[in-house]
Image: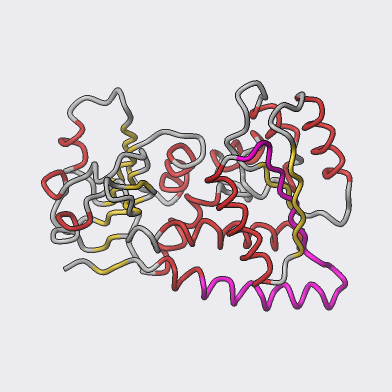
């Protein structure tokens, strides 16, 4: 039976360590602060934002929220970002995605100063990750790497297969694993013979948003499986992209959903805010 990669417990430990760092910064009169921008009222985004504010409170990070109407013009968003860029009391800026279709999210990410880009989406941080330089790393891949490290899972020389090529998970995950000397294959909606590839994976990371898509017969015996998906099944229960029942019988390590990658994503956001304040 697989060992469960307990993201919830590791996130709690990480927050406790960060709280100590935040207290040390406050003694030097540095008060780490996150500004979150939300455009429109996407229900999932509201939940994510609430979780982020709760985590900030727990770690001792100051938090402010900017709620913008869904019908705003692009310039209003850019003006707000520039205002936050110029404020010395704000260390991290986070634009909650998705944003309404008429707005240019890439332009918004480019406008956030790289040193305040705690989500790791500014092209400067993306480029630095590619060059294996110090930067802010997108929080979900960063959380996964921290989890693999905590459980002493060997990455060097292993074949890692990522399913999904999003800018938020798939692409930065590729760079993180490559920087640790894994051999990496990225699969996506146009990939042929997917099962042939997943069966070769020593480490499989799945981020496609399809409930229970990966089943036990697609997995190599003893693999490490990281499930990034958060879906709802027919009964409305939260489940991942991986069919936990069949896959957990075959693998050495697996992340649960919920309680795996999700809590680590938010813990790494807290980590990035503390790093930004230190810098």
Quarter location, residue 24: bottom right
Residue at 71% x, 49% y is 36
Residue 83 placement (x, y as % from top left): 87, 41
Residue 197 placement (x, y as % from top left): 20, 37
Please state which of residues 179 and 2 is positioned toward the viewer in this rendering.
Answer: 2
Q: Which residues are magenta?
A: 12-41
Q: Quadrant of the C terminus?
A: bottom right
Residue 254 on the magenta span: no
Please state which of residues 192 and 6 is positioned toward the viewer in this rendering.
Answer: 6
Quarter location, residue 189: top left
Residue at 56% x, 52% y is 48
Residue 162 placement (x, y as % from top left): 34, 41
Residue 30 on the magenta span: yes
**In the image: residue 195, left or right of residue 13:** left
Colouring method of the image: secondary structure
Please state which of residues 34 and 123 is positioned toward the viewer in this rendering.
Answer: 34
**In the image: residue 190, left or right of residue 61:** left
Above/below status of 143 relative to 9: above
Q: Residue furthest front?
A: 235
Q: How many marks overall?
A: 0
**In the image: residue 52, left or right of residue 7:** right
Q: Residue furthest left?
A: 217
Residue at 46% x, 37% y is 171
Above/below status of 94 relative to 99: below
Q: Quadrant of the N terminus?
A: bottom left
Residue at 21% x, 63% y is 252
Above/below status of 191 relative to 258: above
């Amino acid at each position: 039976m697989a060992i469960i990669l307990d993201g919830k417990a590791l996130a709690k430990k990480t927050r406790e360590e960060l709280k100590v760092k935040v207290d040390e910064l406050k003694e030097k009169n540095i008060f780490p602060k996150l500004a979150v921008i939300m455009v429109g009222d996407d229900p999932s985004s509201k939940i994510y934002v609430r979780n982020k504010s709760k985590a900030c409170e727990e770690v001792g990070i100051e938090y402010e929220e900017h709620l913008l109407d869904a019908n705003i013009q692009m310039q209003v968003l850019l003006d707000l970002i520039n205002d936050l860029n110029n404020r010395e009391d704000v260390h991290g800026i986070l634009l909650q995605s998705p944003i309404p279709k008429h707005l240019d999210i890439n332009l918004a990410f480019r406008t956030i100063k790289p040193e305040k880009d705690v989500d790791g989406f500014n092209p400067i941080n993306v480029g630095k990750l590619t060059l294996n330089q110090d930067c802010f790393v997108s929080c979900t891949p960063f959380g996964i790497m921290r989890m693999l490290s905590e459980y002493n899972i060997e990455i060097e020389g292993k074949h890692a297969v990522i399913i999904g090529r999003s800018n938020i998970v798939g692409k930065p995950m590729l760079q993180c694993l490559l920087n640790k000397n894994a051999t990496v294959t990225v699969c996506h909606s146009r990939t042929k013979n997917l099962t042939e590839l997943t069966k070769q994976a020593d480490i499989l990371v799945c981020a496609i948003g399809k409930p229970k898509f990966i089943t036990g017969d697609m997995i190599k015996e003893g693999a490490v499986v990281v499930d990034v998906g958060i879906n709802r099944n027919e009964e409305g229960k939260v489940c991942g992209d991986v069919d936990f029942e069949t896959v957990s019988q075959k693998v050495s390590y697996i992340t649960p959903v919920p309680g795996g990658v999700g809590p680590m994503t938010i813990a790494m956001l807290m980590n990035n805010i503390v790093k930004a304040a230190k810098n």
